[in-house]
Amino acid sequence: AQKVTQAQTEISVVEKEDVTLDCVYETRDTTYYLFWYKQPPSGELVFLIRRNSFDEQNEISGRYSWNFQKSTSSFNFTITASQVVDSAVYFCALLGAGSYQLTFGKGTKLSVIP
Amino acid sequence: DSGVTQTPKHLITATGQRVTLRCSPRSGDLSVYWYQQSLDQGLQFLIQYYNGEERAKGNILERFSAQQFPDLHSELNLSSLELGDSALYFCASSSTLTDTQYFGPGTRLTVL
């Protein structure tokens, strides 16, 4: 069975602070894919990043960065210099090879206070 | 904008009724997925269609059914609605080249 755990239910930070959202996953697959999605207050789910299990290289996109560590089954997401527009619920998700369904974590609600 | 469209945006109905949610995938995507987001269950996969054929089934109730039409749009039919069916229903699509699922804006269903 596959499982994604986002232990942080809610996080509040003051604008311009850095914040890291944790994601721990469980899978028996050797090939799998990890994703982060953002759900702003308007409700839609916005794709942020996809990472496959063979690529442990960290990725940076503007103020966003992702740290994938296979040894600890973690795929953490850091927002640098947070902004109010970053306020949203962030979901980590797992897709096993040969599977068609995303397994989502419960999400972390991030509030960035001006 | 993901390119996936869903209608209607909001739906309010009564228990026992039947509703149809509609989804148009991104141009060129053959796969369509349906997910339910509720407060207690989180985001749950319901069903997937690929080029008109059902490919995978998740935690979909027997009262729910879906189909994908030749023009690749999909419909999710929910019948004998119960209060607990109130949720946000998402459609997503993906191409054959990538496993990334792009989500539509969702349909918020309220059953009174």
Image (cartoon, helix red, strand yellow):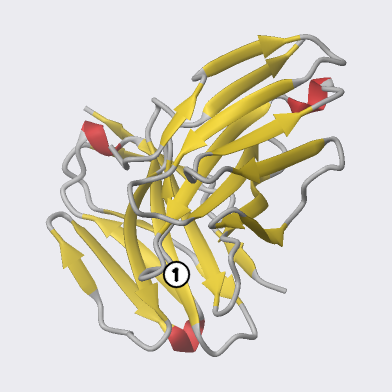
Identity of the residue furthest to the left in this view: A62
Q: Secondary structure at mark 1?
A: strand
- Please, which residue is most extreme toward the front here? B70
Residue visible at 29% across and 67% down in the picture: A66
Q: Tell me: B53 left or right of B63.
A: left
The residue that appears at 78% across and 37% down in the rendered structure is B64
Q: In this orientation, which residue lies closer to the viewer: A68 or A10?
A: A68
Give the residue number, with chain letter if any, for mark 1: A34
In the drawing, does residue A49 fall left or right of residue A62? right
Counting from the top left corner in percent of width and height, residue B109 is at 64, 21
Identified by mark 1, the residue type is Leu
Q: Position of residue B76 (x, y in %)?
A: 66, 35
Q: Please determine whether, in this image, residue A7 is positioned above or below residue B87.
A: below
Quadrant of the rendered image containing residue B97:
bottom left
For residue A20, what is the image quadrant?
Answer: bottom left
Looking at the image, residue A109 lies above or below residue B44: above
Q: Is residue B23 above or below residue B51?
A: above
